[in-house]
Amino acid sequence: MPQTVHRGEVLLKFVFIEPFFGGSHRDFAKGLISHSRYRIELFTLPARFWKWRMRGAALYFAKKISLLNQYDGIITTNLMSLSDFRALRENGCPPALVYFHENQLTYPLAPAERMDYQFGFTDITTALAANRIIFNSCTHFDAFFSLIPGFIGMMPEYQPKWVIDAIRAKADVIYPGCRFPATTPKLKALPLSADETPLIIWNHRWEFDKNPEDFFHALNAVLKKNLDFHLALLGENFQTVPKAFLAAKDQYKKRIVRYGYEKSKEKYRKWLQRGAIVISTARQENFGISVVEAIRSGCIPLLPHRLSYPEIIPAEYHDDFLYKDQADLIDKLTFVLTHLKSLESKREQISNAMGRYAWANCIDRYDHELERLSRLKS
């Protein structure tokens, strides 16, 4: 259990409001609470209907959380309108920190979906209402601030260009902690002979922005080369199952060893430890907790040379594990499946490199932010 720490004679106590308690949002909240030296109380809503959460969660939590002044600060994420929440609290609010896992200015639209500009403005007003803003990667930070000027510029008149500098002045980057030990793991041996079948892992959300079509296209390409593999299709699905996964269930049924979300964290880790390769074909990724977890567990990564991946993967491994396009993914997957033994050393090295993201190695920066936040309380 984390040790309770006092500032002077005052116990530091925070409230964490998470309106979308699933996926990386859930992992981040639980990891912060379990590792912080401070007391953090959690209020949540289920991870569904994200648009309605962004529009209405503030109204729910404004009445749900009583005695708000007993807390030294608020922690929340950008799927709640902090400006609405603060306006609805008649007795005021303690200082607030907002963690941006994603933002609605840069998030890709689903097929046939049109941008609802209100969500982008909610991100902006939430950031303005916060005392401190933290992004989960430099990639995310840069993308957000690169698009704000154009977004504000769409307003036909009276453009509030001042908000850009106002938000940037209180923004920073801290990588999310990952829920694995900081100590060097003992990796399970890879399949190193032709008699053993390597396991390919998909452990991302089953949604359009993770681009499963390119993943299955790459698998089909290596099958045509008579290469063998098993398949674990993990990851959460919040609403309907995408067609790509329904088709895959039938097409790869003899190769699939796990189909669907694994609720047990321990069982999920065991699947990752069995894995030989983890692949991402994402169109949107601001950090990539699932990839970091898989690499730490011993999976060889094959990731696009874009998004956050060049940032979280050390530069010396880019040529081996980051691909430039779909053809390069197929070539690299072919090479990995046929040269596992030659990659054993690099696999161990990159697994060790992911140790920097363990919560034990990140928590001091978060606790420093919470301490800083508490000093702003009047």
Image (tube, rainbow, N blue to C red):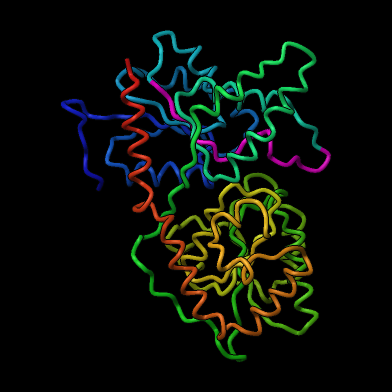
Q: Quadrant of the C terminus?
A: top left
> What segment is highlighted magenta in the picture?
95-112
Residue 49 visible in the displayed image: no
In magenta stretch: residue 35: no
Q: Where 372 falls versus 352 (above or below)?
A: above
Residue at x 72%, y 58% (from the top left corner): 212
Outermost residue toward the right?
Answer: 112
Where's residue 217, x and y in %? 78, 66
Number of labelled discs? 0
The image quadrant of residue 301 is: bottom right
Residue at x 49%, y 31% (from the top left corner): 133
The image quadrant of residue 127 is: top right
Is 339 on the left or on the right of 67, as rendered?
right
Residue at x 65%, y 40% (from the top left corner): 143
Nearer to me, 76 or 128: 128
The image quadrant of residue 317 is: bottom right
What secondary structure is the magenta-colored segment mainly?
A: loop
Where's residue 134, x and y in %? 49, 36
Is 211 on the left or on the right of 167, as rendered?
right
